[in-house]
């Protein structure tokens, strides 16, 4: 058969391409004679497809635009999934839905916006006469395309004097008298603090306030790091809280009205999860347990020395991570999250008095939710404006060598350019890939052209030995004088209740470990500046980012800790940036959420001011307060905003500013399970798809037909803040308690509609729906699976076998030799040997998906 194929191929006339061709046989640039050789096409049929190597060859030659010509965007997705193509443009000329002409024109349009200019006369050559008209300078087609500046919002032209905020602590209005606790309150205590004087004091205070106390002791002292829980008077029921299932945990916690956790006080390192303390790991498990209860219960977490209320206070950075976690839990689970209370060391305040204050605070459900108890009273956490104390000063200038971790990333690159413009002449830039990082060489050349010497080094700043070795790159004649720790990547949102402990540890450690090691390795070395790039996720929160917020809260605390020890430190909790960090759609979504991205220059000007003024911690962000607070404070009061009149309602209590736009989508007739069940099965999913896309369009300010059912939510402009508003709208219409990570768990409107149908009617209402929902989850999870696990479990082979059975429609269940096994390869070879030329060509067409 192969001889016949060679005979047919040798008789074909081949026209050499006008463009170079990368061969998928070799993964390299094809030689002029390769494609005319029949043996080449034999190898093409029988050999391995070197698609990954081919993409690598293109990237190495500077290719940054990938255009797929084919019946479906399969190769586009594969190319976009490769890390080496980050920042490239990936375009398919065909889509699974929509007309071929529309798809092609959309592809040409994307090429045009990426910097290529097509021959428009050729594009419209077959459409008849085309008349070009300029776009009008006014709103047209009844839709505005121009950005509005809403009241209370100032643009970048106003300078940085409106981007500056800080965290402050204001006396909290407290009236302990008359507050009553209802039901049982679990007091969860680490075994290391079983004898802490606060424990019996809390038992007494809960009893005196009308509640029924129940002390649960967690044992985290074993070498294996096992977390166990026992109930007072029932020590024989001890079992692992972290390893137990939801039903088991519900039984142990009972049906409490509230849970008061002291777990954070155990801030020893966890034995199995580097980057977490035993207390933080236990808190993670406890959050899952409380969320698994049949009835909602308020969870309050107590820390000791986790925040700095007054200048010069030392802090415990590891306990501060609980504050970052809680800030996000208040967004993700507003119905069960109570709040945070920080207390001084036991000897600083009498335990009975302290316990009464704590119980009085948790008994006030409409009061503060981020509190610090000190000898001078109770203080609530506030975000306030931070005008410069000494306007016009300009004392700090970079000198010697400045180290920038994450220096080849977007934030780091902007910072490096800014440093050079302000006088830096010796920069040491690090990233995990160092000189091999995308854009590293170009950045170094740019900085050199500006008059600086830039050294780019590969360094994992979470590795102590690597950090120590990094200092060898600092020349003696230009000693290290400043550090900017900008390393870190914001992960995809995941609800903490769905996150494994090891994932929590990895995400948090990625932010904390580098800062911790730099602080440790540099020791008491005198520095002009030690700058930590933190995030607003640790201040106002970001849905689904509890672990990331925990890490950033650690950085904020480290700045206070260094200051308390007389060392240089400045932490900046950044809001979103423009300039390589958000695309046009994401920027539009952020504007709708009330947190438009900042231009790098005014943002970095605030950094200069902070260094001039010797600031310890600033929050830098651009807020459209009426719009932001309408979303942020919709589901519960946000005392954090009470000191900002422009962000609070008429009562000034941190409730949402009324916003008609936010309310109009939540009203309307409710779609109940009964109404949905009454529809024909074929119409149920379509009804939900229409509902899902309609409300997505309202949240984003789009026309309904602009939200495509099979396009990912994140690709049409959703972010963590708009996700909260969207979840709220759907919850109101459907009468369901939906999670804050709804659109991140179900990536497209179609996938979400299938999930909602299952939630309303049950998973057994339609087996096909359940199968499709599982397939959606598999498609979302598969790109993140380790390749070795895919190979070890023969996942690809099993899926190929399943696809073959579905296509054949025969109902066969024989999986003894799935595609990819030796038996399958032998069968294919045997069939090819017996086939004629027409059969071979038909086989090729089928494999390419064009038959």
Image: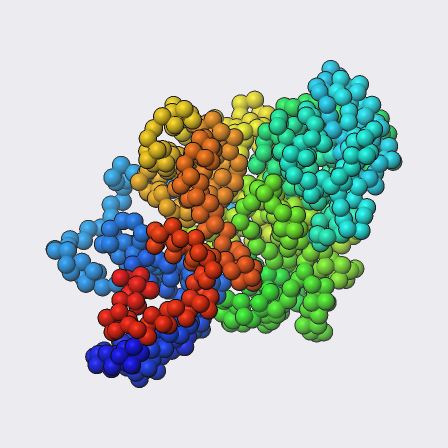
Left or right side of 342 for 627:
left
Numbered disc total: 0
Task: Using the image as rendered, state which of residue 95 and residue 413 is in the foreground.
Answer: 95
Provide residue 79's location: percent of width, then percent of height: 42, 63
Tell me which colouring the rendered structure shows: rainbow
Provide residue 598's location: percent of width, then percent of height: 50, 48
Provide residue 361's location: percent of width, then percent of height: 72, 25
Left or right side of 779 for 35:
left
Does 386 appear above or below 477?
Answer: above
Task: Using the image as rendered, state which of residue 752 and residue 726 is in the foreground.
Answer: 752
Quarter of the N terminus within the rendering: bottom left
Whether residue 378 is visible, yes or no, is no
Does 679 appear above or below 455?
Answer: above
Task: Using the image as rendered, state which of residue 327 and residue 312 is in the foreground.
Answer: 327
Residue displayed at 26% across by 79% down: 4
Whether residue 473 is visible, yes or no, is yes
**Most extreme residue toward the left, as rendered?**
129
Does 601 appear above or below 24?
Answer: above
Residue displayed at 49% across by 69% down: 442
Quarter of the C terminus within the rendering: bottom left
Residue displayed at 36% across by 72% down: 830
Residue 15 figure quarter: bottom left
Residue displayed at 64% across by 53% down: 506
Task: Using the image as rendered, state which of residue 528 and residue 794 is in the foreground.
Answer: 794
**Most extreme residue toward the top, as rendered?**
178
**Most extreme residue toward the bottom, as rendered?**
33
Provide residue 424's location: percent of width, then percent of height: 61, 65
């Amino acid at each position: 058969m192969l001889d016949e194929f060679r005979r047919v191929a040798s008789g074909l006339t081949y026209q050499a391409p006008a463009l170079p061709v990368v061969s998928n046989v070799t993964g390299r640039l094809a030689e002029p004679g390769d494609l005319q050789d029949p043996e080449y096409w034999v190898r093409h049929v029988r050999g391995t497809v070197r698609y990954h190597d081919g993409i690598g060859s293109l990237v190495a030659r500077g290719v940054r635009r990938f255009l797929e010509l084919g019946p479906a965007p399969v190769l586009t997705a594969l190319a976009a999934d490769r890390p080496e193509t980050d920042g490239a443009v990936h375009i398919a000329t065909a889509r699974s839905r929509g007309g071929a002409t529309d798809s092609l024109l959309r592809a040409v349009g994307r090429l045009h916006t990426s910097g290529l200019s097509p021959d428009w006369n050729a594009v419209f050559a077959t459409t008849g006469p085309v008349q070009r008209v300029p776009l009008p300078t006014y709103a047209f087609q009844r839709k505005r395309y121009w950005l509005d500046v809403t009241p209370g919002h100032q643009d970048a032209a106003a300078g940085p004097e409106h981007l500056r905020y800080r965290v402050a602590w204001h006396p909290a209005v407290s009236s302990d008298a008359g507050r009553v606790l209802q039901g049982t309150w679990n007091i969860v205590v680490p075994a290391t603090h079983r004898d802490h004087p606060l424990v019996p004091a809390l038992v007494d205070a809960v009893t005196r306030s009308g509640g029924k106390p129940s002390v649960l002791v967690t044992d985290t002292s074993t070498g294996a790091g096992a977390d166990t829980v026992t109930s007072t008077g029932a020590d024989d029921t001890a079992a692992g809280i972290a390893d137990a299932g939801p039903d088991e945990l519900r039984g142990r916690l009972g049906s409490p009205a509230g849970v008061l956790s002291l777990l954070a006080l155990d801030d020893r390192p966890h034995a199995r999860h580097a980057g977490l303390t035993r207390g933080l790991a236990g808190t993670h498990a406890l959050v899952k347990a409380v969320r698994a209860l049949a009835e909602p219960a308020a969870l309050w977490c107590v820390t000791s020395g986790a925040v700095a209320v007054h200048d010069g206070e030392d802090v415990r950075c590891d306990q501060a991570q609980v504050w970052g976690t809680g800030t996000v839990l208040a967004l993700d689970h507003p119905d069960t999250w109570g709040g945070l209370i920080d207390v001084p060391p036991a000897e600083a305040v009498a335990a009975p008095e302290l316990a009464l204050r704590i119980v009085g605070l948790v008994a006030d459900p409409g009061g503060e939710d981020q509190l610090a108890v000190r000898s001078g009273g109770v203080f609530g956490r506030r975000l306030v404006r931070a005008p410069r104390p000494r306007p016009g000063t300009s004392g700090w200038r970079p000198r010697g060598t400045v180290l920038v971790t994450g220096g080849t990333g977007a934030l780091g690159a902007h910072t490096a350019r800014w440093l050079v413009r302000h006088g830096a002449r010796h920069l040491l830039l690090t990233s995990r890939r160092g000189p091999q990082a995308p854009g590293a060489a170009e950045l170094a050349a740019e900085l050199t052209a500006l008059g600086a010497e830039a050294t780019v080094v590969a360094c994992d700043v979470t590795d102590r030995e690597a950090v120590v070795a990094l200092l060898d790159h600092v020349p003696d004649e230009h000693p290290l004088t400043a550090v900017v720790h900008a390393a870190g990547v914001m992960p995809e949102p995941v609800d903490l209740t769905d996150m494994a402990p090891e994932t929590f540890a990895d995400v948090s450690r990625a932010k904390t470990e580098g800062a911790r090691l730099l602080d440790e390795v540099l020791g008491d070395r005198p520095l002009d500046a030690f700058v930590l790039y933190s995030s607003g996720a640790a201040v106002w929160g970001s849905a689904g980012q509890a672990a990331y917020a925990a890490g950033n809260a650690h950085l904020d605390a480290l700045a206070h800790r260094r200051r308390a020890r007389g060392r240089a430190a400045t932490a900046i909790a950044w809001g979103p940036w423009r300039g390589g960090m958000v695309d046009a759609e994401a920027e539009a979504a952020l504007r709708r959420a009330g947190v438009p991205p900042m231009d790098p220059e005014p943002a970095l000007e605030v950094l200069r001011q902070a260094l001039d003024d010797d600031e310890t911690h600033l929050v830098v962000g651009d807020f459209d307060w009426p719009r932001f607070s309408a979303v942020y404070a919709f589901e519960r009061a946000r005392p954090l905003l009470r000191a900002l009149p422009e962000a609070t309602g008429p009562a000034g209590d941190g409730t949402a500013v009324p916003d008609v736009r936010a309310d109009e989508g939540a009203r309307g007739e409710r779609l109940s399970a009964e109404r949905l069940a009454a529809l024909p099965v074929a119409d149920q999913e379509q009804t939900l798809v229409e509902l899902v896309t309609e409300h997505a369009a309202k949240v984003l300010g789009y026309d309904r037909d602009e939200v495509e059912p099979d396009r990912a939510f994140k690709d049409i402009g959703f972010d963590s803040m708009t996700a909260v508003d969207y979840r709220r709208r759907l919850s109101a219409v459907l009468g369901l308690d939906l999670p804050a990570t709804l659109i991140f768990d179900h990536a497209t409107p179609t996938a979400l509609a299938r999930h909602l149908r299952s939630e309303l009617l049950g998973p057994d209402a339609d087996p096909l729906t359940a199968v499709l929902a599982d397939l959606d989850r598999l498609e979302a999870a598969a790109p993140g699976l380790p390749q070795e696990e895919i190979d070890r479990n023969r996942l690809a082979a099993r899926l190929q076998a399943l696809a073959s059975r579905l296509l054949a429609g025969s109902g066969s269940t024989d999986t003894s030799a799935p595609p990819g096994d030796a038996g399958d390869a032998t069968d294919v070879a045997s069939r090819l040997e017996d086939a004629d030329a027409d059969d071979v060509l038909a086989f090729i067409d089928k494999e390419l998906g064009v038959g």
